Amino acid sequence: MDALLLARLQFAFTIGFHFLFPAMTLGVALIILISETLHLATKNDVYRKITDLLARLLGLIFVVGAATGIVMEFSFGTNWSRYSRTVGDIFGPLLAAEGVIAFFLESVFVGVLIFGRKKVSPGVYWVSALLVFIGGHLSAFWIIVANSWMQTPAGYEVSAAGKVILTDFAAAVFNPSTVARFLHTVLATWITGTVLVCGIAGCYVRKGLHGETARTMLKIGIILFAVTPLLQLGAAHGHAIQVINYQPMKAAAMEGHFETARGADVYIAGYVDEENEKTYGLYIPKGLSFLYNFDFNSEIKGLREVPKTDWPPVNLVFQAYHIMVTLGGIFIGMGLLGALLLWTGRLYAAKWYLWLLPFLIPLAHLAHETGWITAEVGRQPWIIQGLMKTAQASSVVVSKGELAASLTMFALVYLLLLVMFVMLFVKIVKQGPAGE
Amino acid sequence: MENIQNFQILWFVLIFILLLGYALLDGFDLGLAALLPLLGKTKEEKDTLIASIGPVWDGNEVWLITGGGALFAAFPHAYATAFSGFYSAMMLVLLALIFRAVSMEFRANDPARAGLWEKALIGGSALAALLFGVALGNVIYGVPLDGRMEYAGSFFTLLRPVPLLFGITGLAAVLLQGASWAVLKTEGRVQERSFEAARTLTWINAVLAVIYFVVLIYAIPRVSGNALFYVAVAITFAGLIGLFFSLRKKNDAGPFWESSFSLIGLFLAAGAAQFPNLITASNDPNFSLTIYNSSTSLYTLQIMAVIALAGMPIVIGYTLFVYRLFKGKAKADGHY
């Protein structure tokens, strides 16, 4: 195994692991903000109990997210030094802006949310919940800007020395994929927070625990669960069109299209034989062209537009994308079903449905991870689309042995973190809302 | 070109301030955690000590994250050279920071293994504090670099006596910062022990500071012509002398400010010795990474200056607000 592959594995593993936590943080921050707003408005103690339980969970989630997040900030320098030297002009400011504008806000007020209930007035506590929500989402915004710039770079020039020079900060920040990616990712985190709350509250209600608090929590969760996957359907559609427009080779890999065609099919599920350049599976004829601009005969670019050396691993991207889309369908269905049960007054007695809810928690994470694989693997072999290859981006002086050692360290430490996280998460959930 | 030089200098100063902010703030919670077994004997005492840093350590660590981001944004070559060159040491820093971060939360929720998580907290905090000093010592004292700005030493190059002295001096300063935070935030027997620890650490810091300043003059002769260096020396010893009297009078609040003062002096001396270098080349001064040959473009430096100068006062404002919310003596009945 060569050093480049080890470095890529380490980045994929450490960021794939890290992503689990901010995804939960944003969604949980949303629901804390909702329940704390209701608490402030109604003075009903049930909402306080919901907030307090979620704030305890947030404490655990946030700390693992922060601990694994700092690894990512170091990694561009430690493992991708040639990338850092080339794009410092643009990528560095985005990370620095994330710190100044967003992560300070989130981190400082998370302390109030977790430790401040007895110390501060309800108004200050609510403001803290709001600022954690805003800080978290701003943080996601800047990180997504950084990622989007790698997908659809804008606002730059390449100097004679091969350096990327920033020429227009606003154009770099609002590059063609920023808004679409931000909406899609944030909605995914909201779905994650929503199913987390539904899963926990569903367990309580099914077992007859924590009475009114559990039912209220479930109700908030189900209402959001009915809405967020549908919003996501719109955001995902917008993002897919943006990918077809700006990263046609990624889009081609997502659907396994080799030949540029008018009237391209869309696959429900399938398999891509990369060797023989064929895609098999269940498909809707001309579906992709129709979805693209409601014209069954619109043109969709195929992979053969570029040399095979510039293709991403097609089947991996295809499978990851289709798993994500399928999960999206499951969330829409389960969310609407939950809303129907709630509306007809049968939700709290529908044991089979409540029993299913906790299984959605890992599925939401699977959707995040497969979505991320689609976006990042789909960009390969480029680290910056069309501008710099991943193979030219790694550190020069880091040896294979050092990489093997660090990757082993992360594998062991993160396994420990995951085991502890799941164990303590379940423990806090079992302890339930205080005072019940 | 004069214009870009002004911004390069500004960014040296801003990164200096961010790292100083990190040293002062995360310094006290790393130091307190490293001293945990000395200051707290019972579970309740340890809970109280950890409760004094619980709500704020997260925000404190962001000073490092922002400092790192600012280094990347302003001087990407220095960021790339140091982080990739000191690879294994950086991995150790990450290991230490991961464990100190999660161990407080794990300790609180996992009583069966609380002792183990305490050890992770103590070890992670002490190791991180030591390694930051060693890293600064290396970039100031100098490391071998090649003509392409890449590090040309090994892991063991980093462990030479002078950088290690920086590490130990930094660790001692951070421990003092932690002990004086404990003096400020605790009462009774824990506070007694904190006074005791701070007294001993004041002497240790005084001895190390003398060695540190002498070595600095010896290793970087040009610093002796820099007025700022003497100001720094004066600040450090003013802080330490103030500490000596405050601790004798059993003053609660004074020691933390005086300890911070002495740490500012140590930092200022390092900054004065280093300017305008970012990573000094020990083999050939022409290979050194300076603010002039490592920076991003003028436009990036300007945009970032606007964000930092507008944003950081707001950050400092709400950070002070939250510290005020948690002011007064810490109690063990909180989250931890």
Image (cartoon, coloured by chain):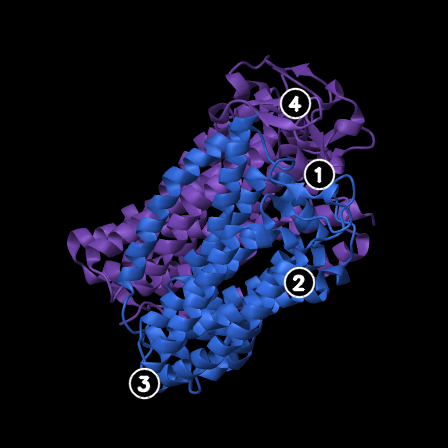
Chain colours: A purple, B blue
Residue B188: give its label. 3
Three-letter amino acid code at the position of disc 2: Pro
- The residue where tag 4 is placed is A158
Callout 4 environment at 10 Å: few (<14), some (14 to 19), or many (20+)?
A: some
- Quadrant for the N terminus of chain B in the image: top right
Query: Does dot 2 land on a helix, a strand or a loop?
Result: helix
Q: Nearer the viewer, residue B116 or A367?
A: B116
Residue A406 placement: quadrant: bottom right
Residue that appears at 66% across and 60% down: B218
Q: Distance between the residues labelled 1 and 3?
A: 54 Å
Front residue of A115/A268: it is: A115
User: Which residue is denoted by mark 1 in the rendering?
Assistant: A82
Q: Looking at the picture, does residue A409 appear above or below residue A374?
A: below
* Badge nearest the viewer, 3 or 4: 3
Asked if both marks, 4 and 1, belong to the same chain, the answer given is yes
Residue drawn at 46 percent across, 59 percent down:
B264
